[in-house]
Image (tube, rainbow, N blue to C red):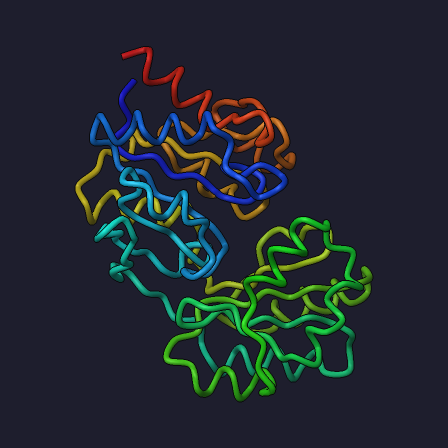
């Protein structure tokens, strides 16, 4: 099978647990490039958060960021990637401020993904190590967030475009309060809560709708698209793709939405599966 396009989540999917790229995944990207099949990293990450080995690879022709709120065409110049916006969905600024105000007094992290960057209040972010985040993911978050002295309302106001929000909690009571506060605001939603965080997005802005839009906009056959995922924010992606693949380490909702299951992210499941599909002709 030669796919029309391949999309893959990054953390827990294309990247190993130590945030490196398994060699077999790079081998598969090389095979896609040779066949002219476009690849798109598809992540909750902001545009500034991609691993260079992935975003700079010649197979990478698109990038889906902030869980589908931003879709870019990737152009390569002098070995580096340039991101050209194709679709931008804005998170309502008033909704972001209302949510922040509704949760005042609670111990939380409240990250604002805006203009391709993940912004955080420096004082609040100083306690990020207390949230039970897996150490390797914690190291990535610390390296990727842009710390400022401003609070959330000020970050939101000065942003050109807010893309999504990322909220971390320490206990179930705070998690439930976050979900209730999101439910009370029209036009936004939260994705499946995971161990310590909730991703808050515009209603309808998800990886699955991004895949469908990209295929229509770029005249790519959705039925022969292939997509990989592992988490709650990948459910719509693997359900929408012609061939939706859940990693061996995927959460149950993702496993149930997929057509296939492959090896884990630490075993290079994405690359192994792509090479098998390509060998089928």
Which residue is pictured at 42% across the width and 81% down the height? 159
Q: Is residue 3 left or right of residue 120?
A: left
Residue 1 in the image: above or below residue 249: above
As drawn, the residue found furthest toward the top would be: 280
Q: Position of residue 82 (x, y in %)?
A: 27, 58
Q: Quadrant of the C terminus?
A: top left
Which residue is pictured at 47% across the width and 57% down the height? 49
Q: Position of residue 15 (x, y in %)?
A: 53, 39
Q: Position of residue 163 (x, y in %)?
A: 44, 68
Quarter of the image for residue 86 reads: bottom left
Q: Is residue 168 left or right of residue 270?
A: right
In the foreground, 147 or 213: 147
In the foreground, 236 or 65: 65
Quarter of the image for residue 100 reads: bottom right
As drawn, the residue found furthest toward the left would be: 219
Which residue is pictured at 61% across the width and 60% down the height? 141
Which residue is pictured at 63% across the width and 39% down the height? 17
Residue 4 in the image: above or below residue 206: above
As drawn, the residue found furthest toward the front would be: 78
In the foreground, 103 or 58: 58
Q: Quadrant of the N terminus?
A: top left
Q: Is residue 63 left or right of residue 124?
A: left
Residue 60 in the image: above or below residue 170: above
């Amino acid at each position: 099978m030669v796919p029309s396009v391949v999309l893959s989540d990054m953390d827990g999917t294309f990247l190993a647990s130590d945030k490196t790229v398994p060699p077999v995944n790079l081998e598969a990207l090389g095979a896609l490039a040779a066949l002219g099949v476009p690849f798109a990293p598809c992540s909750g990450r902001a545009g500034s958060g991609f691993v260079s080995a992935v975003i700079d690879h010649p197979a990478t022709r698109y990038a889906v960021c902030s869980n589908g709120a931003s879709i870019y065409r990737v152009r390569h110049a002098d070995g580096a990637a340039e991101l050209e916006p194709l679709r931008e969905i804005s998170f309502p600024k008033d909704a972001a401020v209302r949510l922040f105000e509704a949760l005042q007094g609670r111990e939380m992290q409240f990250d604002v993904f805006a203009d391709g960057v993940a912004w955080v209040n420096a004082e609040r972010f100083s306690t990020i190590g207390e949230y039970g985040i897996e150490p390797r993911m914690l190291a990535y978050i610390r390296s990727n967030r842009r710390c400022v002295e401003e609070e959330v309302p000020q970050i939101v106001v000065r942003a050109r475009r807010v893309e999504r929000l990322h909220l971390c909690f320490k206990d179930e009571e705070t998690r439930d309060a976050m979900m209730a506060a999101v439910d009370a605001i029209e036009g936004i939603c939260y994705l499946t809560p995971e161990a310590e965080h909730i991703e808050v997005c515009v209603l309808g802005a998800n990886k699955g709708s991004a895949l469908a839009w990209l295929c229509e906009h770029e005249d790519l056959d959705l039925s022969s698209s292939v997509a990989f995922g592992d988490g709650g924010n990948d459910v719509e992606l693997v359900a929408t793709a012609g061939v939706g693949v859940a990693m061996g380490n995927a959460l149950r909702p993702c496993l149930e939405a997929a057509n296939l299951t492959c090896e884990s992210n630490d075993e290079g499941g994405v690359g192994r599966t792509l090479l098998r599909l390509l060998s089928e002709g």
